[in-house]
Amino acid sequence: MAKLIREGELSVREAVEAHLAQIESVNSRVNAIVTLAAEQALQSAFEADEAHVAGRPPGPLHGLPTAHKDLQLTRGIRTTFGSRIFKDFIPDRDSPLVERMKSAGAIMLGKTNTPEFGAGSQTYNDVFGATLNPWDTAKTCGGSSGGAAVALACHMVPIADGTDLGGSLRNPASFCNIVGLRPSAGRVPMVPAPGSPMSVEGPMARSAADLAFYFSAMADPEPGFAKPLKRDFNGVRVAWWKDLGGIPIDSRVRDITNAQRRVFESLGCIVEEAEPDFTGADETFRTLRFRSTAVRMADHFRQHPHLIKDTLLWEIGQGNRLSARDVEAAETKCAELNQRMRRFMERYEFFVLPVSQVLPFDVTQPWPEEIEGTRMNTYIDWMKSCYYISVMGTPSISVPCGFTTEGLPVGIQIVGRHRDDWGLLQAAHAFETNVTTKRFTIVSFGNH
């Protein structure tokens, strides 16, 4: 699409109008785009076409429609954070990521749904309601970047942004059969600094190649960062997960994930069962997450506690009970876990494991309460397969890898070495080139 626009075979207005038509056709059935900025998008498209005719150099994303997660500030366009506190808030400035995307030439069509303040891996809130999974609209799309994942799966946009603390990019990518990258911390600058040292912003797309193209414009890379996606994987060592310290995994997720081992072996990789030591990862993640949530939400908690959802109030309470010594110990342990992971990855270039411990579940269910007979006591317990990786400090990506007999998608999680984001994209590209996952969502393309 970008190539057609650059070469004058497709106008920006045509691209924008086509995506706005798709939004009109399918969005009411999934609730992915919650604030539409059609008039602004068409005006931006007109200006982009005029600039092209005038010969002004286009940005790398010139003319590509996109939508921003409703956690990103967008000047003149409602930004709610999925919260009743901000249900009518219209910012007077753009976030740094939105500014960067505009400078790159992307055309914003609107905002994508997110749970309240991005907390939780199930996309619903009291402002807009729930976003539905296009593969089965009775199921959740995951979260917290669920609106973005569904907009991509339904072809309402070709690229979209998300955020990830404990799996908010990777989980909805897995649930919706698209690609989501949790980049290395700092690769996509966040201003002001994120509330948690584990928080990142990153790209989502329908393929690794699209995602790499988008990420090249989004990231702040060092020289030589972007390389060809195709590479030889013969002899590359890959660590294959075992049991992630004994956490429960749905047997269907386990089976579909493990069936992909042959794909890596067919690429010439040396695949060995091995995984890093996750001892301390759970407590460390929870401490750092709870404390950052309590600090970030302090003013809202004092002024509007009645407008904050129960799970977030619980998390704020957990954070407020932590002492300075608790936080300092967790920060020290986090650094130790990062070093432990780096030593593990000296032998292996990639580590492969499931994205989520469960399949997409009922959209009316706030979170899974049980996995394979093990009770989940809190709304984050079921996301350990993602947040263990977050606390280890390495980049990771969710790539589609298969479907259950019920037609629900499953993603595979590939973890790369410290700051080797592009190597990770190369692995994702090689994997998806050699795995078959072609199906059609019931929402985007009718009952095929």
Image (spheres, rainbow, N blue to C red):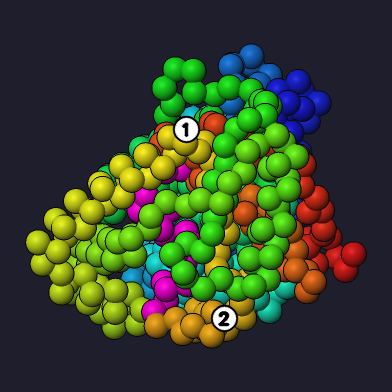
Which amino acid is tagged 1? Asp
Q: Secondary structure at mark 1?
A: loop
The boundaries of the magenta stretch are: 378-395
Which one is nearer the viewer's eye here, 264 or 136? 264
Task: Establish if 2 lies above or below 260.
Answer: above
Task: Label 2, secondary structure: give it.
Answer: loop
Residue appearing at x 33%, y 75% in the figure = 312
The tag earlier along the polypeptide, 2 or 1, is 2
Amino acid type of the residue tagged 2 in the rendering: Glu
Q: Position of residue 14 (x, y in %)?
A: 76, 39
Residue at (68, 71) in percent of width and height: 252
Q: Nearer the viewer, residue 445 or 323?
A: 323
- Please indicate, yes or no, whether residue 387 appears anywhere in the rendered image: yes
* Nearer the camera: disc 2 or disc 1: 2
In the picture, the quarter occupied by the N terminus is top right
Q: Which residue is mark 1?
A: 420
Tag of residue 175: none
